[in-house]
Image (cartoon, helix red, strand yellow):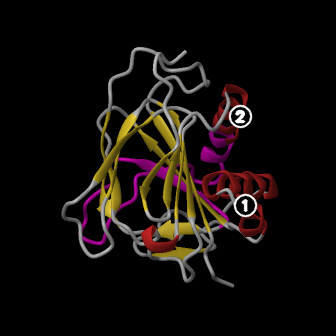
Amino acid sequence: MELIPRERRVLAPGAVHVPDWLDLERQRELVRACRAWAVEGPGIRATVLPNGGVMSVKSFGLGWHWLPYRYSRTRDDQDGSPVTAFPEWLGDLGREAVATAYDDAERAASYRPDIALVNYYDAAAKMGLHQDKDEKVLDPVVSLSIGAPCLFRLGGTANRGKPWADVELRSGDLVVFGDESRLAYHGVPKLLPALDVPDTGLTSGRLNITLRVSGLA
C-alpha cells in the first residue's frame, strides 16, 4: 500500500494519468491474452525502420498491423498473413478508460478503437520521442502499462524539445491523451528499477497496450 497515494494527474491539456487503474486481475487477464496473441501467425517482432535501424521494443498489432509509417490488414513485413482481429471487449475497456480519464461518459460512448498496438520492453528497451500520427482521425490514444515501471515523457506538439512532463508509470497505470495533446511527442527513455512489481504473470519487463482509432476503412 502506498504511504502517499498517487493521485490522478493532468500532464497537459487533454493528457491524463490515472494511477492503479487496472486492478490485478485485469492485468493478469491482459497478460494472458497478450501471450496468446503474441504467438499467432509469425509472432511478435522487433520492427525494422526504413533507415535499417531495429526498434528495441518488440511489438504486434490487433485489428491493423503497424509498419513505419502506415497500417495494413496484413503483416507485410513478416509473412503477409492477416492481422488478428481487434476484440470487442478491448474496445469496451478503451471506452471505460476514456470515461475515467475525462469524466465524460457521453464522450466515451462514441469512442470506437479498432487498433491495439502491444509493445514489450525488456530491461534495455526504450522508445524515442515520437508522434502517433499514422491514424486518419485524432480520437484519443489509450495507453495501459503492466509490469516493470518506466519513465514516460510527454512533450509538446511542435517538436521533440523541452518542456517535457515526466511521470513514472507503474503496473496498472492508465494514460489517455487526446484533444490538444493528441499529437504530442512522447516516449519511454528507460525502464525504472522496482522493489515491488505485482504478480501479473509477466515474469520480467514491461507490457504497454495502446488503443487507437484508425479512421481507415
Q: Is residue 102 left or right of residue 168?
A: right
Q: Amino acid at mark 2?
A: Arg
SS category of the residue bearing label 1? loop
Residue occupied by mark 2: 26
Span highlighted in magenta in the image: 34-63
**Crowding at label 2, few (<14), some or many (≥20) Cα neighbours within 10 Å?**
few
Image coordinates of residue 59 in percent, x first then y, are 49, 52
Residue at 36% x, 42% y: name it.
Answer: 167
The secondary structure that most of the magenta stretch takes on is loop
In this rendered view, identify the residue nearer to me: 111 or 163.
163
Establish if 28 lies above or below 16. above
Q: Is residue 75 visible?
A: no
Which image quarter holds the N terminus? top right
Instruction: Reply yes or no: does residue 82 show up in magenta.
Output: no
Residue occupied by mark 1: 86
Instruction: Reply yes or no: does residue 46 show up in magenta.
Output: yes
